[in-house]
Amino acid sequence: MAMRSMRKARGCWSFIRALHKGPEAAQTPQKDAVKRVFSGIQPTGIPHLGNYLGAIETWVRLQEEHGSVLYSIVDLHSITIPQEPAVLQQSILDMTAILLACGINPEKSILFQQSQVSEHTQLSWILTCMVRLPRLQHLHQWKVKIATQKHGGTVGLLTYPVLQAADILLYKSTHVPVGEDQVQHMELVQDLAREFNKKYGEFFPVPRSILTSLKKVKSLRDPSAKMSKSDPDKLATVRITDSPEEIVQKFRKAVTDFTSEVTYEPARRPGVSNLVAIHAAVAGLRVEEALQLSAGVDTGRYKLLVADAVIQRFAPIKREIEKLKTDRGHLEKVLQNARCHGKNL
């Protein structure tokens, strides 16, 4: 099978040997080892404007800048909350279509489905046995998520940062693009790599974070919170697949303030500043240039200007998504071919 060849080619089982034979069994990373970028995205929910500007655009750029890049559709992470199997499988294909439409190129990066590589969960178990419970319980995202869970959250929700660490370390990744909310999780990944190396010999590179330059895109209805797939207010989040009419409606209803002038003052005027940041990002402008275009325009008219910029940015992506989703066989082939490409790792 292709997966067995992939496993042998990249030597995934050498960390198992290290566990049983000690430090001498581990491979010492070469000083000139190749830089390898890894990142993942859950298949559930349609990516929104914040996902696109904060993550997907960065992915497209990184595949042009680095020779070894892996992007994973992390379906195992998505089952920390209940999922319908048929819906989840379709969501995986839909996410594949969205990423391809946004510019992810299988010739320049490996795009694969996490659950098709069993070593993710195998390494995750080994790392889980190395981390202390209080470390996971003190992670900020765990505290935030259990605050909204009726029964305090599942064990999977608690330990998913360890699976995330396994995702990264399995491929000896050296660089990981992350947002500000993932910094704690990256510190866990780095600590686990160091602890494994100290105990069993130098094996895993200690990966570095690539922090995205764009600040979090805020909710259109609550600029104190980030834009989210799971926001119950449907007007708060702009999705890649939204129609022009839906996008206009959401920006019309965006929360600003009682001052009509457009300025960029995130601390004092978060709502208007969020609009300026979005405008600059989707139009490829600096904030100062976006403000120049808004001179003499009140916030009501500016909302429509920003909406139009977003519509123009997403229009070709939406057309490509619709085209790709009609060819299920092609999407499945992209994910299957990724296994074969893995043999070159």
Image (tube, rainbow, N blue to C red):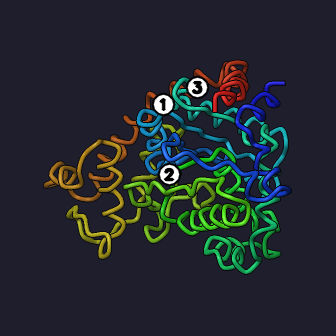
Q: Position of residue 206 (x, y in %)?
A: 57, 58
Mark 1 / mark 2, whichever is N-terminal: 1
**Residue for point 76% across, 65% down:** 159
Question: Distance of mark 1 from mark 2, alpha carbons?
Answer: 17 Å
Any mark on residue 322, and which?
3
Residue holding disc 1: 103
**Residue for point 37% across, 45% down:** 307
Rendered position, 94 above or below 202: above
Q: Amino acid at mark 3?
A: Glu
Residue holding disc 2: 177
**Residue for point 18% across, 50% down:** 289
Q: Amino acid at mark 2?
A: Pro
Rendered position, 193 above or below 26: below
Q: Are marks 3 and 1 in contact (CB under 8 Å)?
A: no
Q: Position of residue 17 (x, y in %)?
A: 82, 50
Pick the residue in front: 284 or 137.
137
Pick the residue in front: 276 or 184.
184
Q: Quadrant of residue 10?
A: top right
